[in-house]
Amino acid sequence: MSSLINYLWEGIICLTIPWLLYKALFEKTTFFAWNRTFLLSALILALLFPALNLEGLYIFNFNRETYQFILPTFEYDGTNQPLNSLTPIPITSFLAGAYLIGMLFSIIKFLIRIFSLISSIKKAKISYKGEYTLLEHASFEPSSFFHLIFLPEGSFKLNDKVDCIISHEAMHANYNHSLDKLLLQLVKIIFWFYPICHLYEKDLEVVHEYQVDEKMKDIYPLKEYALLLIHLGKPKMMNQLAHNFNKFQIKKRITMMTKPKSKRIAKWLYAFALPIFIGLFGLISCDQKDEIVDVEKPQAETKTERAISNEIFETAEDMPVPFDGMQGWNEYLSQNLKYPQSSKDQNIEGTVYLQFIINKEGELINPSVIRGVDPDLDAEALRVIKNSPKWTAGKQGGRDVNVKMQIPIRFKLNKQLLD
C-alpha cells in the first residue's frame, strides 16, 4: 500500500510542476504543436517516473558484473509492529479502499462513454467521404472520434458549411487528437481524485482547437470561418471522448486566430522544460538511490568464507527461504529489533544495509554492515541478523549451496511515540 501511495503522491508532483510551468510560460504562445507535445510529455512522465521508483527484488552490482539478491526493505519504527507488516494499518486500508472504489467508478464512467459512442454509431445514418466515416443523427452535434465524424441530421443542406465542418473534424483525425484524449482518460482513471487532471484536459483540448483553427484559416477566409464558429456555438455537448466542434470559447479561439505569431526566439522558453523534466526524474525516479548498494569486490576472502566453501553464489536456482517464510522473517525482525535510545534522542533515522551468507546448512553466517547510518543503529541491525534462526538453504543443480544475500533495514522514528 505504501508503494501505491508513493506512486500517487509522486505522480501528483509530476503533474503539478509542468502544468504550472505551462501556465506561466507557454499557454499564450502560438506554438501549438510544441504546447501539445509539452502537455502530453507531462502526462506520460507522470505515469512513468513514479513507476521507475518501485522497489524490486534484484539489484545490479557493476563491480561484480552479476546480479545479487536483495531482500525487500524492512522498516522498523521502534514498536513490535513493522511498518511493512502484512497486517494493514486501518487508516491505510480505508484510504486504499476509497481509492480503489473511486478508480472503479472512473473506469465505469469511461466504459459508459465507450458504449455510448458505440450506441451512437449504431443509430446513425452512415455515409463516407474518402477515409472518413460520416455519421448523421438528429441528436448529434458536429464532433469526431478518430476517423468517425458526427453530424446533425440535415447537415448536407448547409452546402458549403458542411464541407467546412467536415474539414475541421478531419483535421482532428489527421492530428490523432483522439489518442490524446484516450491518454487523458487513463490519467484521469489513475489520478481520479486530483482536479488538475481536468485542467490538463481543458488545456489540451483548447490546444487541439488552436491547431485545427490555424490550418482552417489557411483554407477558408477567416471571417467566414469565424462566423461558422459563432453560428455553431451552442451549449450542447457530445460524448467526452469526441472532439466537439462548438465546445470551446469562440471569442478566445477567434482572438488566437487573429493574434500575431509568437517570435521564433520565444521557442527558447521551452528549454526550461528539459531541466524541469530532468529534475523530476532525479527527484522522483532516483530518490531511492540510497537503496542501491554498490558493494566492492573484497580484496581477499575472510577466514569464515574460506572455512565454509570456496563456492559462494550471488543467486541460485532455488534461493534460501527464511523460517516460516517472509512473514516469519518479518515477525522475527519486528519482535527482536530495538530502537537504540541514543538514536531516538538524536532523532537519527536511516537505512542500514547488511550482507550475509546462508550456508549449506541454512545457517546465517558472516554478517556485516556494508553501508551504515549510525554506529548504534548499525550494531542493533547486525545483532539481530547474527541471532537469526536457520533458513532453508539455497539449491543449485539440486544440491545445497552457499548464497550471499543483502537486506536493507530502515529505522524510522514513530513520531506518535515521541510526542
Image (cartoon, helix red, strand yellow):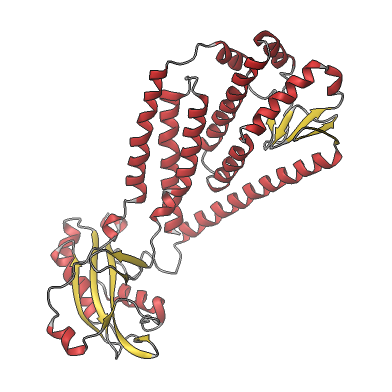
Q: Where's residue 18, x and y in %?
A: 42, 34
Residue in the picture at 56% in, 35% down: 198
Q: Would you identify the image quadrant in which residue 300 lies?
A: bottom left
Q: Count numbered badges in the picture.
A: 0
Quarter of the picture containing the C terminus is bottom left
Q: Is residue 261 left or right of residue 310?
A: right
Given residues 99 and 369, the one toward you in this image is: 369
Residue drawn at the location 51% of the way across and 37% of the way down: 40
Question: Where in the figure is residue 299, as x and y percent of width and height?
Answer: 12, 73
Task: Give percent across and percent down for residue 90.
Answer: 47, 61
Task: Give the farthest residue toward the front.
Answer: 130
- Closest to the observer: 105 or 116? 116
Is residue 74 something that shows in the picture? no
Residue 137 location (% of width, % of height):
85, 31
Question: Which residue is more in the foreground, 371 or 257?
Answer: 257
Do we see residue 368 in this rendering?
yes
Q: Is residue 22 above or below residue 381?
A: above
Whether residue 145 is situated above or below residue 269 in the rendered picture: below
Residue visible at 35% across and 30% down in the picture: 272
Position of residue 67 in the picture relative to residue 380 (left or right): right
Q: Is residue 349 left or right of residue 251?
A: left
Query: Where, by quadrant of the figure, is residue 203 drawn?
Result: top right
- Rendered view: 332 above or below 144: below
